Amino acid sequence: MPLNREDKRAVVAEVQAEVAKAQSIVLAEYRGIAVGDLTKLRAKAREQKVYLRVLKNTLARRAVEGTPFAPLADQMTGPLIYGVSEDAIAAARVINDFAKSNDKLVIRSGAYEGQVLDKAGVQALASIPSREELLARLLGVMLAPVSGFARALAALSAKRAEDAPAEAAPAEAAVSTDAAPSEA
């Protein structure tokens, strides 16, 4: 069913609102994908907070006009699905992961920080660890010296605890041998 002019304005306004908050946009050709597979892709996108939408290219061009993503308008041809995310890598990761398992989804291009990315650029962006993963790695690096120091202290105290009874036993034996001749 074709959209009337008011519906088109509403769609452009909705997409403009998402693009205004976005750090990255990924375009992928979805020709020949089964509806069930597309539904799975949308569900995965929702989990990752990625705005995923099939749009008329003219409406998408109007939505990105005057934004850092405007250079991407030249790439907007053919049947495309648009992934838009506030997280710099979420859209690229969702679409790239899905494209690995479904060869009918072809990554066309993307944009990040005002630069247009080709397919390889989008795949490189998708391979960057997420913010949570990077923070976990940083925390691990920061805690490694502290935990190593704690293990060393525990080993030292355990060694001293083992050595203390061994030193005490010869001293008691010396006391008991000294005491034995005097009793006789």
Image: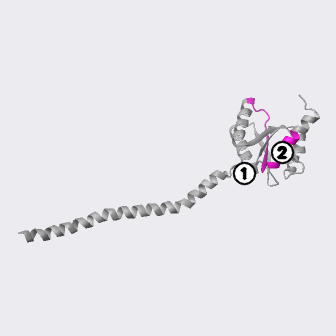
Q: Residue at x 73, y 46 (%)?
A: 92
- Horizontal arrangement in the rendering, residue 22 relative to residue 133 (left or right): right
Task: Give residue 143's quadrant in the image.
Answer: bottom right
Reply above or below: 184 against 48.
below
Q: Residue at 10% x, 68% y: name it.
A: 180
Badge 2 marks a residue whose secondary structure is helix
Question: Residue 7: horizontal and vertical position, in percent?
Answer: 90, 34
Instruction: Give the camera-side residue of 148 and 37.
Output: 148
Q: Position of residue 37 (x, y in %)?
A: 72, 32
Residue 123 lies within the magenta run: no
Of labels 1 and 2, earlier in sequence is: 2
The number of discs equals: 2
Relative to 130, 160 lies left or right? left
Is 167 placed above or below 42 here? below
User: Among all residues in the image, which is located at the extreme right?
Assistant: 5
Residues marked 1 and 2 touching at CB (< 8 Å): no
Per the image, the residue denoted by label 1 is 125
Asked whether 71 or 172 is in front, the reply is 172
Vertical relation: 131 (above or below) 146: above
The image shows residue 103 at horizontal and vertical percentages of: 72, 37
Residue 150 vs residue 84: left or right?
Answer: left
Nearest to the eye among marks 1 and 2: give it.
2
Which of the numbered marks, if any, corresponds to residue 17? Answer: 2
- Disc 1, SS: helix
What amino acid is found at the position of numbered circle 1 in the picture?
Answer: Leu
Furthest residue to the left?
184
State which region is magenta.
11-35
Residue 143 appears left or right of 42:
left
* Residue at left offset 51%, top offset 62%: 146
